[in-house]
Image (cartoon, grey):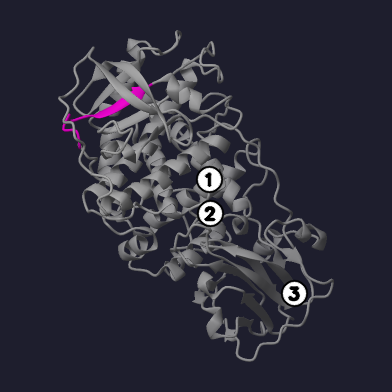
């Protein structure tokens, strides 16, 4: 017990006020009285999930009777519906007379990794919103699913004209003429005839084609094995990869990130601007900045290209499986769609041969292989940013969201945790992820049907796991097997890299010894973590959760740590 208690050093009341997730109450919090509290009398390792509306919002920890205890309490909003503005609720969590709190969340340095901040995030989310609108238009017959033109397989050296988004709204298009520089059994790589000098040469393009096509660890086989086959609406047998400076120009001056590439569902329809086939777009090297945006070396472009493709190819497969194959009026919900695409990045890091991954530029991480650094380091950083303050960010982001990196961290963490818990092969989880993609279900319905568990249970369990992950003082038992990530030791990764991560572990809950009083907002899928410490001499304690929106489906999750 002493070892556990030493993990939570003395902290100050003043630090609580700085937390973005809630606010202090009065200097002396009110006594919590509850008519019919739910008794939380657990042995170490035991847990319970409760609906506060059934108990007047109140839980009670009994008199310790001479045995000190430590519990983790999470208060979370579990409604998984994706709405334009997001589902949230105001909350108040009270208990006792005194508070000890975690340090205020700190700014996290943006270092290395594959990350899409600012403009790039907004553009990516805008494309997924366009895909949602397309699915509904196709389902009602406004736009035809089948393109009017059937294309023959491309030939090496052949030229083709493409439509490319002219701006980040993608409401107009520019024409690009490109030449097929690589043609394989599953992919054809076209290079814009107007690509600037100092960029990709034939050997670079051949290497990219070989990485895509490798029968063991190629990008094509990894994504299709994990998520199902892509479409072939134009009958040419390949996915076209278009490398063009028109993508570079979408990033502007790159001050808010680089749009490394994208997939557009419009290309699988007959809508205006469609290329009537499977196309993935990516930038080109521009070391001399001839596009007037920002310099981009060949090394940086080459480093980002495969990571971007494996992410976007999942979106292409998902659109095919949900909309084209099953005629759904809905694409996958954004939070789950993005979570699966970031999971695809991780799959690349786990399965691609180390010989195919370059030495990471400038941010070596001794706890990750070269390939995991190239493909999954962005996910690790995004997850850290989320775990610093889980109450501040949606898991189920609103339809109006620009798709922030922190949301992506939550999306990836939840998918990773699901695969760990419900896949037969918890490392790769191919059969499970195929079930998530090869369906007409979407969002929370998809998740519940694949896991056989309600979302109101899954979310509290996941949020508990976000704290107990890798905590050696919390002894995992079969009853608490869901309170972990089986394939990552995030505590080790973060604590082993103090130059990149300011905290040894980002999630540091406020600590309740004799009392707590917090208020704020619970966002869908996310919530508040609190440590409740009871000494041998303490008496019974009540904790009461009140919320302002029943639709948010608030839940208590409690696990006795020791």
Outermost residue, right side: 27
Q: Are marks 3 and 2 in contact (CB under 8 Å)?
A: no
Residue located at (44% from left, 25% from top) = 247
Q: Real-space Cα distance between discs 2 and 1?
A: 32 Å
Q: Specify few, some or many for label 3: CA neighbours under 10 Å numbering under 14, 14-19, or 20 or more.
A: many
> Residue 119 or 98: which is nearer the viewer?
119
For this view, does 2 lie left or right of residue 46? right
Q: Measured along the vertical axis of the image, is residue 180 above or below residue 320? A: above
Task: Name the spot of residue 31 as percent of width and height, x first.
Answer: 76, 83
Q: Specify few, some or many for label 1: CA neighbours under 10 Å numbering under 14, 14-19, or 20 or more.
A: some
First in residue order: circle 3 vs circle 2? 2
> Residue 435 or 181: which is nearer the viewer?
181
Residue located at (79% from left, 72% from top) = 98
Disc 2 marks which residue? 470
Q: Which mark is residue 515?
A: 3
Outermost residue, top side: 197
Give the residues drawn in magenta, as a range.
233-243
Disc 1 marks which residue? 402
Q: Could one spot residue 208 in this view of the protein?
A: yes
* Residue 35 inside the magenta-drawn segment: no
| Residue 26 picture quarter | bottom right
First in residue order: circle 2 vs circle 1? 1
Q: Are marks 2 and 1 in contact (CB under 8 Å)?
A: no
Task: Name the spot of residue 14 as percent of width and height, x first.
Answer: 82, 60
Q: Measured along the vertical axis of the image, is residue 382 above or below residue 523? A: above
């Amino acid at each position: 017990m002493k070892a556990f208690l030493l993990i939570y050093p003395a902290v100050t009341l003043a630090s609580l006020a700085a937390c973005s997730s809630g606010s202090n109450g009065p200097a002396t919090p009110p006594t919590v009285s509850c008519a019919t509290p739910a008794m939380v009398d657990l042995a170490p390792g035991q847990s319970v999930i409760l609906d506060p509306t059934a108990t007047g919002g109140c839980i009670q920890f009994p008199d310790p009777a001479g045995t000190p205890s430590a519990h983790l309490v999470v208060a979370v909003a579990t409604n998984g519906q994706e709405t334009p503005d997001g589902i949230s609720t105001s909350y108040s969590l009270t208990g006792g007379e005194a508070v000890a709190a975690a340090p205020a969340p700190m700014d996290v340095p943006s270092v290395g990794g594959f990350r899409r901040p600012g403009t790039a995030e907004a553009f990516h989310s805008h494309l997924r919103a366009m895909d949602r609108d397309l699915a509904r238009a196709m389902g009602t017959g406004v736009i035809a699913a089948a393109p009017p033109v059937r294309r023959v397989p491309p030939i090496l050296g052949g030229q083709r004209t493409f439509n490319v988004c002219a701006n980040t709204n993608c409401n107009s298009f520019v024409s690009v003429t490109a030449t097929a520089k690589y043609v394989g059994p599953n992919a054809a790589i076209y290079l814009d005839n107007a690509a600037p000098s100092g960029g990709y040469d034939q050997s670079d393009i051949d290497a990219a084609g070989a990485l895509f096509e490798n029968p063991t660890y190629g990008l094509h086989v990894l994504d299709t094995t994990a998520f199902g086959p892509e479409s072939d609406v134009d009958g040419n047998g390949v996915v076209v990869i278009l490398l063009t400076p028109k993508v570079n120009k979408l990033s502007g001056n790159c001050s808010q990130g680089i749009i490394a590439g994208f997939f557009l569902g419009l290309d699988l329809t007959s809508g205006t601007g469609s290329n009537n086939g499977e196309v993935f777009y990516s930038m080109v090297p521009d070391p001399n900045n001839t596009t007037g945006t920002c310099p981009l070396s060949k090394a940086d472009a080459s480093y980002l290209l495969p990571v971007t493709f494996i992410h976007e190819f999942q979106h292409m497969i998902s659109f095919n499986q949900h909309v084209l194959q099953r005629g759904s009026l809905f694409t996958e919900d954004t939070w789950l769609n993005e979570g699966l695409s970031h999971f695809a990045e991780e799959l690349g890091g786990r399965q691609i041969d180390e010989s195919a991954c370059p030495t990471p530029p400038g941010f070596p991480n001794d706890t990750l292989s070269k390939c995991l650094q190239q493909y999954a380091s962005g996910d690790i950083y995004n997850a850290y940013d989320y775990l610093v303050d889980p109450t501040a960010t949606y898991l189920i982001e609103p339809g109006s969201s620009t798709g922030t990196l922190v949301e992506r961290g939550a999306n990836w963490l939840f998918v990773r945790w699901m695969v760990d818990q419900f896949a037969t092969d918890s490392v790769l989880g191919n059969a499970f992820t195929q079930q998530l993609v090869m369906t007409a279900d979407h969002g929370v319905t998809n998740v519940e049907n694949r896991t056989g568990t309600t979302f109101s249970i899954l979310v509290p369990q996941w949020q508990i796991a976000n704290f107990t992950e890798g905590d050696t003082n919390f002894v995992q038992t079969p009853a608490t097997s869901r309170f972990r990530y089986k394939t990552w030791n995030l505590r080790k990764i973060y604590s082993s890299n103090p130059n990149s991560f300011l905290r040894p572990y980002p999630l540091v809950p406020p600590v309740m010894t004799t009392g707590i009083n917090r208020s704020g907002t619970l966002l869908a899928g996310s919530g508040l973590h609190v440590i409740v410490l009871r000494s041998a001499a303490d008496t019974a304690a009540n904790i009461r959760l009140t919320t302002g929106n029943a639709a948010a489906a608030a839940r208590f999750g409690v696990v006795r740590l020791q």
